[in-house]
Image (cartoon, rainbow, N blue to C red):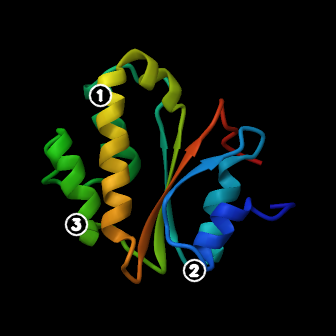
Amino acid sequence: MTEPVPRPLAAVLDGSTPAGVLPWPAERAVADALTAARDAGWTGAALDLDGVADKAAFMERCVRALRLPDWFGRNWDALADSLTDLSWCPAGRGRLLVVTGWQGYAAAAPEDWSIVEGVLADAVGYWRDTDAGLAVIMARGRARQGA
């Protein structure tokens, strides 16, 4: 990582600001966010939604990228439950989820995407006042994966 991470993420990682849903500049590699999280003692996961156009594909990507538990039921309630019961996911000082390639899914299934946004916002809110928060980065554009 050659330059500091954007201030909103840096403030979350150092604990000076509560975790939230954060933007990420398109010109920055999302690997920078995951590296910064790891360096700060957080765990991180990347959810690449490029090519996802429906709920079934979205759920399958979640299963693989997040390594969801066997009890995950591939529905909105199960996703919400999985993100508020993170006993299956080591916390460290916190958890960072980086979402890339989401714009196509949002355009193809706007009602579903609205539900996804609500589930993510609710999960972030659920963990906000805990010792190990959950932050979500919504990478803009076609965010670069690597350096």
Q: Work out whether residue 81 or residue 71 is closer to the camera in this orientation and state it.
A: 81
Q: CA distance from mark 2 to mark 3?
A: 22 Å
Between disc 3 and disc 1, the foreground one is: 1
Describe residue 98's horizontal placement relative to residue 115 as left or right: right
Q: Which residue is drawn at the image coordinates 66% and 42% (left, top)? A: 145
Q: Residues within 10 Å of mark 3 (few under 14, many from 20)?
A: few
Q: Residue 124 at x, y = what percent?
A: 38, 61
Q: Disc 2 residue type? A: Gly
Mark 3 or 1, nearer chain start: 3
Q: How many callouts does the rendering have? A: 3
Residue 85 visible to the viewer: yes
Q: Residues within 10 Å of mark 2 (few under 14, many from 20)?
A: some
Mark 1 or 2, nearer chain start: 2
Residue under numbered circle 3: 85
Q: Quadrant of residue 15?
A: bottom right
Q: Disc 3 residue type? A: Asp
Q: Disc 1 residue type? A: Asp
Q: Which residue is drawn at the image coordinates 56% and 79% (left, top)? A: 41
Q: Quadrant of residue 3?
A: bottom right
* Mark 3 secondary-structure assignment: loop
* Mark 2 secondary-structure assignment: loop
On residue 112, the disc is 1
Q: CA distance from mark 1 to mark 2?
A: 32 Å
Is disc 1 in contact with disc 2, using a CB cutoff of under 8 Å? no
Describe residue 115's horizontal placement relative to residue 8 as left or right: left
On residue 61, the disc is none
Q: Which residue is drawn at the image coordinates 57% and 74% (left, top)? A: 17
Q: Residue 102 at x, y = what percent?
A: 49, 31
Residue 38 visible to the viewer: no
